[in-house]
Structures are given as C-alpha cells and as structure tokens.
Image (cartoon, grey):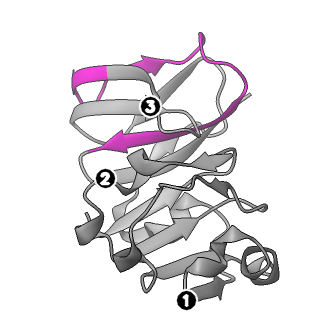
Amino acid sequence: MEKVTLWDGVTVVDQGVFTGSTAIKALIVLADNPPSLADDSFDESLKGIDVFVMCDRKDAYDNSDWKVFTNIQEDCNLSGIEQIASNNTINIYPNPASDFISVQTQGDVSITNSLGQIVKFIKNLKQSDKIDISDLENRIYFVNAGRKITKLVVQ
C-alpha cells in the first residue's frame, strides 16, 4: 500500500486506516475539516509521511491534532479522487446518473460510499453490461475496478 485516501465525511481516523502502516508513503485527505485522530491511530514511524490536503486547508490541519505529522502539504489539484488518480480512472456514463450506468471496464467492479464501505459488487462485469444504481441514495460514490477508481454522482 503506497497511499491511503480519506474521503470527505470521515470524522475519526482510527487504527484500521493505518493497518500495515509500514508500507504507507502518503496520506491524501479529501476532507475540508480535519477528522479527529484516535489516540492509538498510528505509531511514531508515520509522523514523517507526506500528508496532502486540499488547497487553503493546511492551516486547519496544522492547528489540529494532525500537527503530529511533520510533512503536511497543500495540493490545489485535489478537487476530487479523479484528480488524484488521473492515470487510474474508469470511464462511467452517464455521470451524474440516477438509474443505470455503463462502466468501460471488464471484471469485478465495486461501488463504495465515502467511508469506503462496499454498497454494490458486480462480479465479472462485461464491457456491454449496465449497472443498476436505482437503489442507491443520492450522494457521491466511488466505482472501483482493480486498481482504478472514479467518482460517481448519484442524483
């Protein structure tokens, strides 16, 4: 694991986020307000990892319990996960969507919410298959296929 991404909506960062922490090289935080760090959430070796926060949010992180990280950096290109993983995106259409989406990939596909919980899993998707999303609530999700991920807006 090279990067851990925390989505907007995460309120507490606990030990689970840092499982296998020796392999983490960067932490990307897509939350306007710093999530609370649980007291036992990380070990001393993580203090020097790169932490990337959205533009104009560095002060908020520097003035919170995140100040334990010594390398907090602002990145004004972090407007969403598709910016972070521009080389690893999946084409989805339509997007935004309300009933069905077509995903330009093959194989297993999962749709996760902002907390990383899988809300839909499709095994062995074929290029021509459509995914029924009519049962999903109106919000932002992430479509994952292999190591690729793209934001999906359901409205």
Q: Does any portion of residue 119 appear in the rendered image?
A: yes
What residue would you read off at disc 1? 70
Q: Quadrant of residue 68?
A: bottom right
Q: Residue at x 73, y 25 (%)?
A: 138
Q: Which residue is mark 2?
A: 19
Q: Disc 3 vs disc 2: which is toward the camera?
A: 2
Residue 8 in magenta stretch: no
Nearer the camera: disc 3 or disc 1: 1
N-terminal label among 3 and 1: 1
SS for tag 2?
loop
Q: Residue furthest top?
A: 135
- Amino acid type, label 3: Ile
- Residues under numbered marks 3 and 1 in contact, where contact means CB atoms less than 8 Å apart: no
Which badge, 3 or 2, is on the more N-terminal residue? Answer: 2
Is residue 103 toward the left or the right of residue 6 in the image? left
Quarter that holds the C terminus: top right
Tell me the number on the disc at residue 12: none
